[in-house]
Image: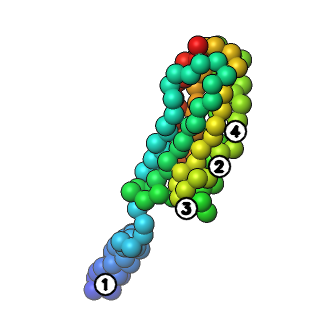
Amino acid sequence: MKKRISISIISLCLLLTACGQEPAQSTNAEQPKPLNVNLQGPEALRKNESGNYKAEVTYGNEKVNNDDVELIEFEIEKKDGDGKGKMLKPKQIGKGVYEIQTSFSEPGTYTVQSHVSAKGTHNMPLITVTVK
């Protein structure tokens, strides 16, 4: 009888140990990389002067393909404004490179912010622009 109980306890312990282990994770899965957006453009313009703003988008060290970009918009907003910016769709001018051209009709301080989503990641860098 004691032998039967001992075998049952050992079997139960082995069963619980086997069930409690997590499966090995695959090392082949792609690790997430940072989504980088290099936003460039003039930080000072005169009233009604046109400026080009460009976003260079990379995922890790590689420029993103247009198919991988879920969203790309530029938002222009006056700092003293009502909090509602104007959204502009950029043109793709190269692999991972997007651009808008805009001008400002009133003097003041503005922000130009790109909203970029690609490969499940979002990045929103901005530039402050002074218009005289």
Horizontally, residue 25 falls left or right of residue 85, namely left
Numbered label attached to residue 65: 3
The three-letter amino acid code for the residue at tag 4 is Leu
Q: Nearer the viewer, mark 3 or mark 1?
A: 3
Q: Say whether disc 3 or disc 2 marks the residue closer to the N-terminus.
A: 3
3D distance between C-alphas at marks 3 and 4: 20 Å
Q: How crowded is mark 1: few (under 14 residues within 10 Å), some or many (20 or more)?
A: few
The three-letter amino acid code for the residue at tag 1 is Ile
Q: Nearer the viewer, mark 3 or mark 2?
A: 2
**Residue at horizontal 58%, vertical 53%?**
93
**Residue at horizontal 61%, vertical 63%?**
67
Element marked by disc 2: strand
Answer whether residue 27 is visible to the viewer in this image: yes
Q: Circle 1 is placed at which residue position?
A: 7
Q: Residues within 10 Å of mark 2 (few under 14, many from 20)?
A: some
Q: Where does residue 51 sit, x and y in percent of width and height?
A: 59, 32
| Towards the viewer: 33 or 73 | 73
The three-letter amino acid code for the residue at tag 3 is Asn
Q: Circle 4 is placed at which residue position?
A: 88
The three-letter amino acid code for the residue at tag 2 is Lys
Relative height, residue 10 to residue 129 (above, below): below
Q: Circle 2 is placed at which residue position?
A: 91
Horizontally, residue 39 falls left or right of residue 90, namely left
Q: Nearer the viewer, mark 2 or mark 4?
A: 2
| Towards the viewer: 75 or 120 | 75
Answer whether residue 16 is visible to the viewer in this image: no
Q: Do the residues labelled 4 and 1 touch (CB within 8 Å)?
A: no
| Towards the viewer: 48 or 77 | 48
Relative height, residue 109 to residue 100 (above, below): above
Q: Residues within 10 Å of mark 3 (few under 14, many from 20)?
A: some
| Towards the viewer: 105 or 7 | 105
Horizontally, residue 8 falls left or right of residue 56, namely left
